[in-house]
Amino acid sequence: MTLSKRQAAAVRTGQVVLAGDHYKVRVSFIDGSRPWIHLPPGLSEDQARERAARIAKKAIEERWTRKDEAAATEDAREARTGTDTTTIAGWFETNLEDRERRGQAASAPASHVKTWIIPALGENKRMDAVTPDDLRQLVAALDRAVAHDEIRWKTATNIWGTVTKAFKDATNSKNDKLRVLTTNPARDIPPPDKGRLTAKVHIFPSEFIKLMNCPVVPLVRRRAYAFAIYLYLRPAELEALDWIDFDLAHEQVTIQRSISRELGTEKAPKNGMARLPMSIEPELMPLLVAMKRESGGKGRLFGRLASESDLAGLLRADLLLAAVSRHELHHNSKDPPREWMTMHDLRTTGITWMAVRGDPLLVVKARAGHSSTEMTEHYINIAAVLRKSRYGEPFPALPASLLGATEHEDTETDDAESASRVLH
């Protein structure tokens, strides 16, 4: 294969593009494939280009093909030689990369570090120079942010959780590079103040049927909404859903991965463990069979999704298109504290429906992948009230229109370049 000068340059150096809080590189492999490889956050453009050139050179030397993409991604995640883990910035960068290698990375700690921890403690301050008073001031700053409605109290609690976990790791991590302290300055520091729990919202079965039957909502989005509810999926789990997760012969599914918002790569679900194989809601089976016939049963079902905030806006807009305008779904509230509908609340919907249907607590816990029964009991308590109302039948049969696009829907999705534009 003869390469043009431009292609040859790309092979040698790789293409570098800023993607939110990190850079991604596109490297040409010898088989002509050019996958995007996401780098860890915190790299400068020069550092990203240096790493891209190193990966591109290695791809040529080792004759990588598409099947070597996982090796390229692992190479991209390697910590930079000489990172100074004695400083705040260096320690947290190494910590986040270490978590990613162990399948524990999440977007929240990265944003906590960038937005709160480094500004409060100082990028170049040494880890062993952080005092309990420094951390008390950080807690005070979080309390002020909550009081001024800049963040929610639960967010403040999560940020503080990132701080305490970090200094615990800095004291006794199994990773020698991260174990830089002899005493933990965060020990015994009172956490940020707690507030009232934010009420969850979910859609009722009758509202769901309206959404599924609305022809102006693109078919791919209606299908994604159905899967999120009927399989109780978080958005990152929905994005990672692959045909290899299904055993249609026995009508079972195993939720075993999610997508890292930092790198776009696969990682373990939120609690770090795959859920046990579980039976698929019978009403979802016809749609699964139809989609497998369309796709050939290979690869991810929905592919890369947009950000959760963008997905939430699309969902609420689609609900309005379907004439689902219940106030609680489209308006948040401070008193009582309640958030409007988001993509994550489709998972809330599925779990609530299980509880309303009367599924045993331990069954709901296992299917939802909850780490404690306390989390599940919240849904059981809500269901006890809903059963006394005219609620509707949970997990209704899906309409036939979901099994294949009509001529009208084909036009709609063509205008949006199908799934790659309506979900991405």
Image (spheres, rainbow, N blue to C red):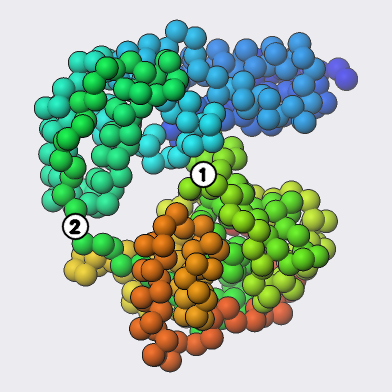
Across and down, in percent, residue 115 comes to 29, 34
Which residue is pictured at 17% across the width and 35% down the height? Answer: 188
Question: At which x and y percent is residue 340?
Answer: 35, 66
Q: Is residue 98 above or below residue 243?
A: above
- Mark drawn on residue 195: 2
Query: SS for tag 2?
Result: loop
Q: In the figure, is residue 299 to the left or right of 136?
A: right
Residue drawn at (54%, 28%) of the image: 101
Please state if 366 lies on the left or on the right of 416 as rendered. left
Q: Which mark is residue 272?
A: 1
How many marks the image carries: the answer is 2
Left or right of residue 239: residue 192: left
Identify the residue shown where x is 35% and y is 83%.
385
Q: Amino acid at mark 2?
A: Gly
Asked if 188 appears above or below 379 in the picture, the reply is: above
Q: Amino acid at mark 1?
A: Gly
Q: Nearer the viewer, residue 28 or 101?
A: 101
> In the depicted view, which residue is nearer to us: 322 or 42?
42
Residue 188 shows in this picture: yes
Q: CA distance from mark 2 to mark 1?
A: 28 Å
**Residue 293 is drawn in which quadrant?**
bottom right
